[in-house]
Image: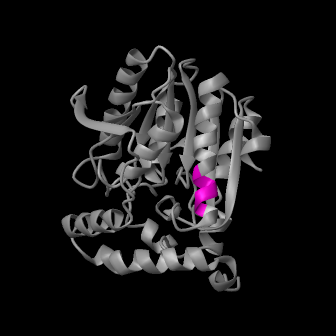
Amino acid sequence: MPMTDYDLLLDDEIKAFVAQTLQWYPADTFAQSVAENRATYDAMCRAFFAGYPESIAARDAKVAGVPTRQYRTKQARSGPLVVYLHGGGLMLGGLDSHDDVCAEIAETSGLPVWAVDYRLCPENTRLDAVQDAGLVLAAARKSSKAGVILVGDSAGGWLAGALARRNRDAPDILGQILIYPGLGGAMNKPSMTRHAQAPLLSADELGAYALDAEKCTIAPLTDPNFSGLPSTLVLSAECDPLADDGPLYADAIRRAGGQALAIVEPGLVHGHLRARHMSKRARRSFERVNQAIAQLANDGRLDAAILTA
């Protein structure tokens, strides 16, 4: 297969984002220790930190023993609670890495947002991360009479899908929004070859993360039964070895009778949430996230015509 020409696929705004990211998080970062890698990742995330909207207040609190950061806007409206699960390959990130993303979701939606600081690999297991996220989800379901919406990016999308699978047919889980997720299953999908050398996440780098194990039986794409899952939006990045996971997952949900929409964002790369203030394409993708939250909060259904416009 010929080499993918990213000079043609990426516009100047995304090229600038890739260059800025690599200044903070170079390609050889995985040669560092886990602690050093986490520090480098956190510094990179902070370099893109956009601050809080003025209307947002946040507080840190433990929920069922799990650290969370809870966001609320002064213009809060009645509605469901958003549970946000951060990316980072189940190895990196925490309450600070996606802090401004969660604050902006709370401000745009008018809904409370709980970010989850789940335990990380390799000193813990994937099941520990799922357990922590599940404890917070259970508490959120008890706290919110209007239901819960799951949102996760990258490995956080994997976690959201795992929780949706474990809570199949739960009417108060109104939907899930997965942003460039890695959803497990076979590692020989076409995008793994087509975008093996994609900017910001290569197929080789996936091997250093905890989310790529084919034997993880709770991964969303290993589910033998896709029925009873909530309304689902998956936003994949075109230039990402994980690009095929979203369409495969959404198709499986639809074939099982559920509602699911997969959008592969053209010309975008893994991690493009951080580019939402410097790229029109990334900003439009983030707008889709917020539009989907609004739709799920209103009637639990996704309007494909609006989301794909």
Residue range of the region highlighted in magenta in the rendering: 282-286
Regarding residue 27, the answer to whether it shows in the image is no
Front residue of 54 and 143 = 54
In the rendering, at what x and y percent does residue 308 appear?
75, 49
Residue visible at 21% across and 29% down in the picture: 65
In the rendering, at what x and y percent does residue 183 appear?
54, 50
Most frequent secondary structure within the magenta stretch:
helix
Q: Is residue 7 left or right of residue 52?
A: right
Q: Is residue 11 above or below residue 118?
A: below
Q: Is residue 154 above or below residue 200?
A: above
Residue visible at 33% across and 55% down in the picture: 97
Front residue of 220 and 289 = 289
Residue visible at 53% across and 68% down in the picture: 278
- Is 96 magenta? The answer is no
The quadrant of the rendering that contains the N terminus is bottom right
Regarding residue 282, the answer to whether it shows in the image is yes
Residue visible at 38% across and 44% down in the picture: 54
